[in-house]
Amino acid sequence: MSGRFQARGEFMKFSTFEKIGFGFLVAAWVVWGSHQIGGLLVHATELEKPAYVVELADADPAKTDSPAVVESAMTLLASAEPGKGAKVFKKCKSCHSVNKGGKNGVGPNLWNVVGKAQASVVGYKYSGVLQGLGGEWSYENLDAFLLSPKNYANGTKMSFSGLKKAGDRASVIAYLRSLSDAPKPLP
């Protein structure tokens, strides 16, 4: 009887190479089988139009005949609505507070920012670029900064890409203007 068990034991002995090969084969079958079962359970349908459109700027300026003209928010500022600006400003609230005496967040508190000296909020550590600009947050400077913070102050810590629509910029500027005990007169 001992010989019979011994023969069976010999049959079950595989080399390490064979065990590794069998392991890869089983793993490949599991991956292939999972893919097949997933394909049966989830049916992919192609959309008629993309669910999310990514707009890319033309990276090669040589391809354009004329430079892009950016509309200034200054022409729209007189008719801009602070209420609409508050809605657009929701994009900014994750980094900026706007209440009087509010704490700085990732960005500085923006209470009474219109007409204030640039890089002057107490307790906020500005990038060297903004500290070196000088001047004040005039309506024109706010418009340029909101259009493209990186172009206005190349090297700024602000990662926001900007507001491309002049109407949105004008509304945000009107909203920021309203965040003051004594709002600055319009230009």
Image (spheres, rainbow, N blue to C red):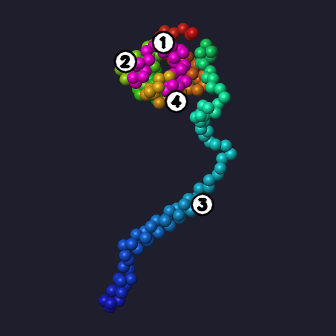
Q: Amino acid at mark 1?
A: Gly
Q: Is residue 107 left or right of residue 71?
A: left
| Residue 178 - label | none
SS of the residue at dot 3? Answer: helix
Closer to the camera: disc 4 or disc 3?
A: 4
Which residue corresponds to the image point at 59% horizontal and 34% vertical from the top-left?
60
| Residue 122 - label | 2
The CA span between labels 4 and 3 is 42 Å
- The mark nearer the N terminus, 1 or 2, is 1
Q: Is residue 5 left or right of residue 97?
A: left
Q: Amino acid at mark 4?
A: Ser
Q: Which residue is mark 4?
A: 161
Point out residue 30 in the picture as x, y percentages from the top left corner: 49, 65
The CA span between labels 4 and 1 is 23 Å
Secondary structure mostly seen in magenta is helix
Q: Is residue 155 left or right of residue 82?
A: left
Q: Which residue is mark 1?
A: 115
- The mark nearer the N terminus, 4 or 3, is 3
- The mark nearer the N terminus, 2 or 4, is 2
Closer to the camera: disc 3 or disc 1?
A: 1
The CA span between labels 1 and 2 is 16 Å
Which residue corresponds to the image point at 46% horizontal and 65% vertical from the top-left?
27
Q: Which residue is mark 3?
A: 40
Residue range highlighted in magenta: 127-151
Q: Is residue 154 left or right of residue 123?
A: right
SS of the residue at dot 1? Answer: loop
Which residue corresponds to the image point at 43% horizontal and 21% vertical from the top-left?
130
The CA span between labels 3 and 1 is 63 Å
